[in-house]
Image (tube, coloured by chain):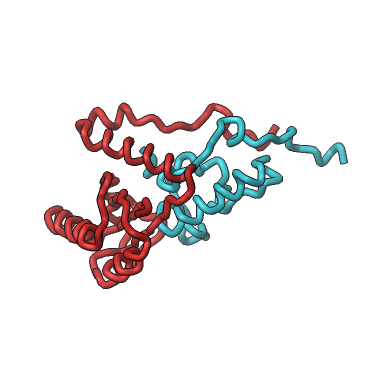
Amino acid sequence: MAERRKYKKRYCKYCEAKVDFMDYKDVGALRFSLSERYKIMPRRLTGNCKRHQDMIATVIKRARAAALVPYTVTRTTVVTAPFENLR
Amino acid sequence: MRNYENLVIVKPTLTAEEIQANINAIEEVITSNGGEIAARDAMGMRKLAYPLAKNERGYFHVIYYSVDPSAISEIERRFRINEELLRFVTIKYDTNREVTAWNQLVQKAIKKATQPAGEAKVEEEVVIPAAFEKDEEE
């Protein structure tokens, strides 16, 4: 098992930054909890606490509805420059 | 009265005047239903994350307003009729925490609107704490 421990001990980075509210329009801040294929990263990898994971999940889903973040990235719809909208 | 936020995406094929006229019409829908617009934030022309009605780009506009909750269904019905509107997202700000966040967003939008365009870009700081850098592989 010791071999499998690839990740270091996790803690909630949102708790550390004392995030109370997340804005779905701020795509750059969502980046942390999104995988390369724009999937929502699981809690076991990011170390987010339950409360913040629930918050980020709703916010990402809102951003998807607003066409700020893609739902899926396939071979044909691959994003050449991710977050190029970021200002 | 409850606080809301609406993000609307207008078709990119229109000219600048037509887009402005459309946004005025959208705001008119809100005010005619008893809404009070607190702030508006023009995000401008952006690339869409996925095509909407075969459009790759869209004009984003955000409106912060407060209105009676019963009027929302009528506002959304009117939005659906508008053919130039690609997408709209209505967000409700209900709890105390959300209301304070709404006030902050309104302040930010007003500040951005009053500042000249070039300056606003420099002032706008993306708050990403240093801890947020990806460190998956250790």
**Dividing the picture into quarters, in which one does residue B13 lie?**
bottom left
> Is residue A79 in view?
yes
Q: Can you say which quadrant of the picture contains the C terminus of chain B?
A: top right
**Dividing the picture into quarters, in which one does residue A48 lie?**
top right
Q: Colour of chain A?
A: cyan
Q: Can you say which quadrant of the picture contains the N terminus of chain B?
A: bottom left
Q: List x then y, in percent, for residue B88.
A: 34, 61
Q: List x then y, in percent, for residue A54.
A: 60, 50
Q: Is residue A75 above or below residue B45?
A: below
In the figure, the red chain has which letter? B
Q: Residue furthest left?
A: B17
Tally of marks: 0
> Is residue B12 in view?
no
Q: List x then y, in percent, for residue B86.
A: 31, 64
Viewer-closest of A81 and A86: A86
Q: In this view, does B101 lie to the left or right of B120?
A: right
Q: Is residue A75 above or below residue A27?
A: below
